[in-house]
Amino acid sequence: MSERKQVKVFKGLIIDTPTSNQIRFRDSFIGVENGSIIFIENTLPKEYSESDVVVLKRGEFLFPGLIDCHLHAPQYAFIGTAFGKPLLEWLEATVHNFEPKCADKNYSEKLYNQVVRKTLQNGTTTASYFGTIHTDSDIILANICEKRHQRAFIGKVNQDQMFPDNLKENADKSIQETIRFIESFKGYHFVKPIITPRFAVSCTRDLMKKLGQLAQERDVFLQTHLSESPGECDLIKSMYPECKNYTDVYEQYDCLTDKTLLAHSIHLSDEEMDVIKKHESSLIHCPNANLTMKSGFCPVKRALSKGIKMGMGTDIAGGFSASILDSMRLGLIVGNINDIVNKTEPVSLSEIIYLATNGGAHCLNMQDQIGSFEVGKKFDALRVDLNANDSPIDLFEWNGNEQMVERFILQGDSRVIKEVYVEGSLVDTSI
Amino acid sequence: MSERKQVKVFKGLIIDTPTSNQIRFRDSFIGVENGSIIFIENTLPKEYSESDVVVLKRGEFLFPGLIDCHLHAPQYAFIGTAFGKPLLEWLEATVHNFEPKCADKNYSEKLYNQVVRKTLQNGTTTASYFGTIHTDSDIILANICEKRHQRAFIGKVNQDQMFPDNLKENADKSIQETIRFIESFKGYHFVKPIITPRFAVSCTRDLMKKLGQLAQERDVFLQTHLSESPGECDLIKSMYPECKNYTDVYEQYDCLTDKTLLAHSIHLSDEEMDVIKKHESSLIHCPNANLTMKSGFCPVKRALSKGIKMGMGTDIAGGFSASILDSMRLGLIVGNINDIVNKTEPVSLSEIIYLATNGGAHCLNMQDQIGSFEVGKKFDALRVDLNANDSPIDLFEWNGNEQMVERFILQGDSRVIKEVYVEGSLVDTSI
């Protein structure tokens, strides 16, 4: 009987996307033991009693924890400001002023607690963060995620050119610090290091190549930016005459593997997409930032049709929202814009949910653990309640499962995310 | 001394847009008596004592009540559903099923209470509503707005073709009912009737012309839809061979005056804009609906540069949000899209705030009463608190006035709208 106490059982609507083309609705019993899902059944297995079951009311459902595959923790300091500046101007106006402050560990600790709390409140159970060049502050971020039970990939940022002195290191120091950073990841359960050359504009060829090789030697993930803004793409052309295109830069300098996350990836030729597919690298869609910074419209349907792995990112603070629900909403809108402008089929609701959950899990090679509800996967889940106190949504009697999930994506925010679970444990989002 | 009790005095940050090119920040005392602003001063006038003053804390400010110049009250029943369907398909999928229900006054009363509560919670102090063809239910909506102190223009919808039988009347009946509707507006303080030919597709020439003339005879406002979707524009071309363009339809059939609100107005030639300007009619920008239904991108800067009056609309339920803050956010994004696609200058923060406040007031010919804070205007105001409990915004120490208003527009929602005032009285948004 003592074993049974570890089992948590919910009964009610469970929504997820096993594939990008299907929103799955199950009205089931789901059992969780030691953080993992042990059954999903239409009837309660005999060994459990009805009194053990948490029954979800109408308007409530379980939804996979949201996966934010691209955000910058230090940039939370200026989220929601500097709207409309294009990337290169924006970097100067914001990043140049704020990221140097992260040399101060007290400053970083306070700020990083804020961004982790806010993303957890918004249902982000897994995140891939850019930190800054300041290794010790990046380690603080890792400790905060570990302590608060947010799964996270944490990146010590590498850049040895373009940025002012207080935001760059020479290539040797950058590599040494990256090795020190990776080696500090001992005893963590929820967090992992990710190698983070900021982008090809800010890294010398030498640094990029060494980082790519280090990622492969140590078998860790690597994240960077690709083809975000037209101005940046022009700069890359002039900086890398030996490369065919922007994607080719990363290929030539050993940064493309099946553990690479490429944020933005807007202005890509078919040839570039084919290279990304060949390496099984992932494309991270950040619609808020792309609309806010006038970068362009990510060709999501084209990438999906080529079978490229895709996830979503808030891109704090290029994006002004800490919520992946906002990313999904704006992702749907970018799909419509692509339809209006380029006559490409718009992205569907199931595709956008998939990107924010199961798709992101595939990008992070965690598809066997998170992203949907399957026996054997971890229970990373949101308990959504559309009838929550102060809910922005008036649920109507006629609303069935389809309307509930559509309205959650279009109208929901942290007010309807009643509980956040990571590996079966309730996360305290109030602190 | 008894007179003094009627005076309410606030001290703190006051934000508004006297023109579309200026966000004005004042740190002042503002006094309100009998619903009107009687002073805005840097020092407290001698006749008042400091103890009478409500002092706003850091993070708090007064903002003009928001003006929603285009929304459909009956469509709140299906808000946040049917994303991505183009206008004509969408009408069949949603409006055809739901608007007939408003023949039932009990149904309408419940629904209209919900939409008025939700828009008030989101800071909409003035709204221009489409009802349905059902006059008695439209009167119920008027009564609800009056009782709850939401300023409103209420439209009994007119349509005598295109729609199914349970959503149309013949032209004579439509006119008679409109006259009965207008004549029922006695003793109201906050609400007014507005004549509402749905759009040129749904009205015969006879009906449109009579409605236009009725509006002019009775000196009331008129609202309709103009040039929303490409499919609709094609239909208009084939339906009205005698007209030069869509705008010309309304001009020929007497619907364009300085009291006309034209919702959407996306696909307009310069010639059409010049006609709208000539009549001093207003263009209502509904970015959420236009992106959601793939209608297109309203050319806001072009219209503003011609001096056309402009306001904003949520366009419930073409738009999925009941918040004019969402309209402002998406309006900024549409400005960026116009920059990317058409190389037109993006709309500015001050312009978008102006549209949602003072611009809307001009559209409704209420610029002497609402839309900004001036001595003699009514006190229709939001008390915003970015540090409210459960605020989606973490305010940072470095955030000054500019950042506070930018973050309010980009990240705010009803949680930071702490108090809503209409004509000096606090509105109860909880019921």
Image (spheres, coloured by chain):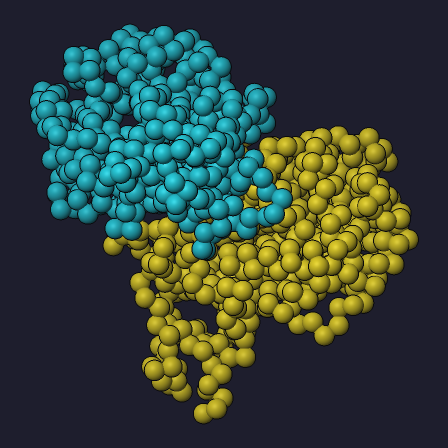
Chain colours: A yellow, B cyan
Whole-percent x, y for residue A311 in the image: 59, 51
Whole-percent x, y for residue B262 in the image: 33, 21
Q: Give the residue displayed 43% in from the left and 73% down from the top.
A: A30
**Residue B383 seen in render:** no
Residue A238: name its quadrant: top right
Say which of B113 and B367 sits in front. B367
Q: For the C terminus of chain A, give its image quadrant.
A: bottom right
Residue most toward the bottom? A1
Residue most toward the right? A172
Q: Give the residue displayed 73% in from the left and 53% down from the top.
A: A102
From the viewer's perspective, tell me whether residue B426 is left or right of residue B64: left
Residue A370: name its quadrant: bottom right
Whole-percent x, y for residue A6 in the image: 49, 83
Residue B216: name its quadrant: top left
Q: Is residue A106 above or below residue B31?
A: below
Q: For the N terminus of chain A, give its image quadrant.
A: bottom left
Q: Give the residue displayed 35% in from the left and 68% down from the top.
A: A56
From the viewer's perspective, tell me whether residue B266 is left or right of residue B175: right
Q: In this view, does B218 lie above or below B59?
A: above
Whole-percent x, y for residue A405 in the image: 40, 54
Q: Give the residue displayed 59% in from the left and 42% down from the top.
A: B399
